[in-house]
Amino acid sequence: MHKYNFFLFEIMVLLILDHKSYFGVLQHGHSH
């Protein structure tokens, strides 16, 4: 059960990091 919680936590962290980098890319390439 503890490993499962850690797994969910890791996914959440990855999603948050992905989200931040995704928005960073959007802001970077927003020079149309």
Image (cartoon, rainbow, N blue to C red):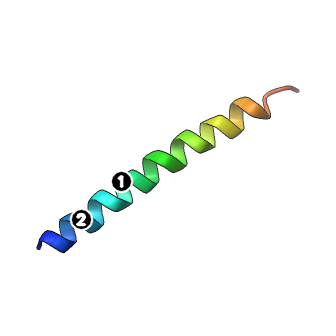
For residue 27, side relative to residue 12 (left or right): right
- SS assignment at label 2: helix
Q: Residues within 10 Å of mark 2 (few under 14, many from 20)?
A: few
Residue that sits furthest to the top in the current view: 31
Horizontal arrangement in the rendering, residue 28 relative to residue 16 (left or right): right
Q: On the rendered structure, is 21 left or right of 17?
A: right
Q: Amino acid at mark 2?
A: Phe
Amino acid beneath label 1:
Met
Return the x and y of residue 13 as percentages of the image width and height: 38, 52
What mark, if any, has residue 29 been given in the picture?
none
What residue is rendered at 52% in x and 44% in y?
19
Q: Position of residue 2 (x, y in %)?
A: 13, 70
Dot 1 alpha-carbon crowd within 10 angstroms: few under 14, some 14 to 19, many 20 or more: few
Q: Which residue is mark 2?
A: 6
Q: Is residue 30 left or right of residue 19?
A: right
Query: Nearer the observer, disc 2 or disc 1?
Result: 2
Q: Determine whether 20 is above or below 10 in the image.
A: above
**Residue 24 occupies quadrant:** top right
Q: Residue furthest left?
A: 1
Q: Which residue is mark 1?
A: 12
